[in-house]
Image (spheres, rainbow, N blue to C red):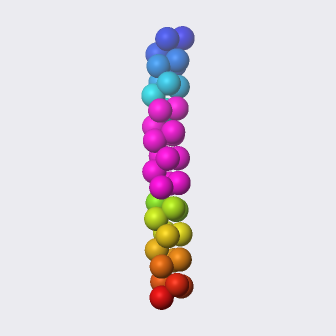
Amino acid sequence: MEPSFFTFQGSGIYFVIAAISASFANFIIAMTTTELVGN
C-alpha cells in the first residue's frame, strides 16, 4: 500500500512539473510568434 502511495505521489509531482514546463514552453512560443508577427 505504502510503496504504491509514494509512487503515486512521485508521479504526481513529476506530472505537475511537466505540466508547468509545457505551459511555460507554450507561453514562450506564443511570445515568439507574437514578436515575429509584430515585426
Count of marks overlaid on the render: 0
Q: Position of residue 35 (x, y in %)?
A: 48, 79
Name the chief secondary structure element in magenta: helix
The residue at 52%/47% (across/down) is 19
Q: Which residue is drawn at the image coordinates 52% and 25% (left, top)? A: 8
Question: Which residue is pictured at 53% across the width and 85% down the height?
Answer: 37
Question: Residue 3 placed where, x, y %?
Answer: 46, 16
Q: Is residue 10 above or below residue 27?
A: above
Q: Residue at the far bottom: name it.
A: 39
Percent position of residue 12, x then y: 52, 32
**Which residue appears farthest toward the front when viewing the image?**
38
| Image x and y of residue 9, in percent | 50, 24
**Quarter in which the N terminus is drawn:** top right
The residue segment tinted magenta is: 12-24
> Relative to 12, does residue 24 appear above or below in the rendering?
below
Choose between 3 and 18: the one closer to the eye: 18
Above or below, 16 against 34 in this view is above
